[in-house]
Image: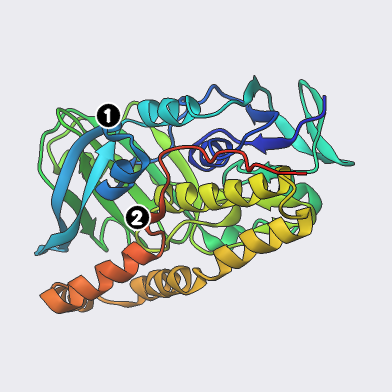
Amino acid sequence: MRYDAIVAGASFAGLAVAAQLRGRVLLLDRKQPGTGQTSACGTLLAVAEHLGVMDSVLQVHNHFEIWVGHRLVRYNLLYPFCTFDYTRLCESLLERTDADVLTARVKGMKEQGVETDRGYFESDLIVDATGWRATLARSLSDDYVDRRRMCFGLETVAPHRAEGLHFWANRTLLPDGVTWVFPCGDFSRVGIASYAGRTDLKAALVKFLGSLGLSSADSLHGGFFPWALRQPVVENIFVVGDAAGQCFGLSGEGIRPSLYFGQACGRAMQKVIDGDLSLAAGQAEYSAFVKSHGIYFEAMGALQRLFPHLSELGLYLAGGFIGIRPVLSFLMREYWKGSDPALFSSSKPQRAAHHA
């Protein structure tokens, strides 16, 4: 029951880690990989291109629109976005791993391993990719998860065709958040999120659907998502994705950072497995990589904190300023660098050759 590495959580972050590893790897999740979608599944098209998962793309978007009250701001994007199929992308990443996949509920850390409802498993290399709950990290540090630094969102799917990504900042409907429509071919993902972490959003979502002439929300998915970085290493474990707070404030984009930092974590871990780095050095390399991107998360978090304090007119004027082409181009380039898609790898690294 001992492994070279154990990855708890088999969504974007956990799969990104596992796909970078060679050796005896255990991938744990309470659900089968590719099930249990909680995300709107939208990201930069370059993510799919550089990961080599273009077959998961459902629709490409070259612009987005923000309605502030009854005023519209439209942006032509420097970098196109896409909406994609969650199951297909997860399956593509899973095919790149050699991991043993076990459906089990992770309970927490125990001694030098992970305790689950299917048994106890040991490794020197352990990853917490269990989502915002950070089950392993929280079992080591009670205050690791700060609910005050999380948003909450709900989403449903409706038959609706459109072009571009669409957002609404309607203070009457929701004073501390936004609603959106993400088209995905013949249907759209329609959602609502509270930056303050309010969970009583279903009635507002139904009202928003009605304003678009769409049916009520019968099937919902969603949950909490963080907007501030957490420590990427807790004692002897690596923490990745939402578990590590690797989700941008304001935009709520967590897929790209989860994949980006997941691959970086996997690369550092493989160096430990190959004997090129000690565990402490591998953790230091990953931690330094995450912290070198901290400014992007801090900036997006600051914008999110500012959002509730602006009137609708203030938001509209700010949106108009951002829409000035040089300003938009600069901001999008910075947003890109927060988790640079050009650094994604579409294949697993080869095991390093060691010579006597």
Label for residue 124?
none
Instruction: Give the vertical position of 270 relative to 283 (above or below).
Output: above
Quadrant for the N terminus, please: top right
Q: Residue at x 11, y 34 (%)?
A: 161
Q: Which is nearer the eye, 183 or 23?
A: 23
Q: Residue at x 45, y 37 (%)?
A: 347
Q: Amino acid at mark 2?
A: Ala
Q: Residue at x 68, y 51 (%)?
A: 238
Residue at disc 2, secondary structure: helix
Q: Nearer the viewer, mark 1 or mark 2?
A: 2
Quadrant for the C terminus, please: top right
Q: Which is nearer the eye, 16 or 74?
A: 16
Q: Amino acid at mark 1?
A: Asp
Q: Which residue in the protein does label 2 denote?
A: 342
In-image side of 1 versus 12 (left or right): right
Residue at disc 1, secondary structure: helix
Q: Which residue in the protein does label 1 denote?
A: 55
* x then y, percent, for residue 68: 17, 65
The answer to which image quadrant residue 30 occupies is top right
Task: Give the mark count.
Answer: 2
Q: Which is nearer the eye, 313 or 40?
A: 40
Q: Residue at x 52, y 53 (%)?
A: 261
Tell me the CA gap for discs 1 and 2. Answer: 18 Å
